[in-house]
Amino acid sequence: MRRIILDTDLSMGEPGSEIDDGFALALAAADPELRLELITSVNGNTDVETATLLSLELAERLGLSDVPVVRGAAAPLTRPDRARGAPEEIRERYGRHVPTPGYAAAAIADLVMRSPGEITIVAIGPLTNVAAAIVLEPALAENVQEIVVMGGIFLGQTLQASMPGEFNVWVDPEAADTVLHSGAPLRWVGLDVTNRVRLTREHADRLAQGTGGFGPFAAEATVRWIERMRKEHPGDPSLSDSCAMHDPLAVAVVAHPELVTWRDAHVSVVTGEGKARGVMVTDLLTSAEPPAPNCRIATDVDVDAFMASFLGALQAL
């Protein structure tokens, strides 16, 4: 059984909000080969206060009330002025939830150092908390079992001039750069493969037939998110009836690495200001004198195997 920390910018639960973080948390709860020991929140898809409250709400729905939820970074490492507060309606609706006291970076470092070689960090939001934990305790890099990141795009582009890097990296490229330079064992699951694993309206219909507390709730959230993406991206036909399960794939490969094809690479990220902020530069080590690899990247995925495993696990919730 793999012991994991899930670091997330979860927003599932609000009408029309992104849903894959919530499905990743559900998969972490459902996979018998994973033991979720800590949930940490981070600024990203939503503000960190909302991410914290919604993580607590979904954890309760999933029967994970005994798992600590610790609030994390409110802004990117070098952009503290970008911190946001939760909307008042979020506080009113979910304010009964109280996170575990402390700071996410410290909680991550503490758990890893208390169990050297046993903890995997699964980072499915911007890497602010993980980078801060590494800076706080540099020995984390040699004591973590591995860090699995949903982030980046390595063999392609986003094709969006307004966001040239994949979202999680683009939000805080300085944090991603810190993690890449840490020396920790890293596996990155990027848009090259996550865009291929998709939840459809038909899948949502199946979820709606569930008798537990998650299926109908998840089905409604899925349909609303697909509708929002269809309206916001009318030029992308792939978004008219499905949505990508980016984050669940990153959770799945912790216990089932065979679901994807891996390749050693040396990856760097463009930081600072400029049009290329957040873009990742990938060296596949094919030259006569390649740089040393600093991570493994996913280059392909067995879509059918993942979707069968994923949907099968969710049926139990």
Image (tube, rainbow, N blue to C red):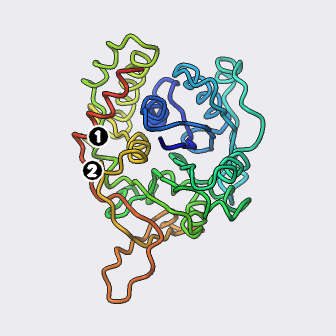
- Contact flag, marks 1 and 2 (Cβ < 8 Å): yes
Q: Position of residue 114 (x, y in %)?
A: 69, 50
Q: Position of residue 112 (x, y in %)?
A: 65, 51
Disc 2 element: strand
Query: Which quadrant is the C terminus positioned in?
Result: top left
Q: Nearer the viewer, residue 194 or 213?
A: 213
Residue under pointer 2: 301
Q: Which mark is residue 306?
A: 1
Tell me which residue sits at (70%, 36%) in the image: 85
Disc 1 element: helix
Q: Nearer the viewer, residue 250 or 82?
A: 250
Tell me which residue sits at (35%, 78%) in the image: 285
Reply above or below: 27 against 130.
above
Viewer can see residue 202 = yes
Q: Is residue 144 left or right of residue 24?
A: right
User: Which amino acid type is shown beneath numbered disc 2?
Assistant: Val
Q: Position of residue 9 (x, y in %)?
A: 56, 40
Q: Nearer the viewer, residue 180 or 117?
A: 117
Viewer can see residue 73 = no
How packed mark 2 is, by other alpha carbons closer than 10 Å (few <14, some 14-19, many 20 or more), is many
Q: Is residue 48 left or right of residue 180?
A: right
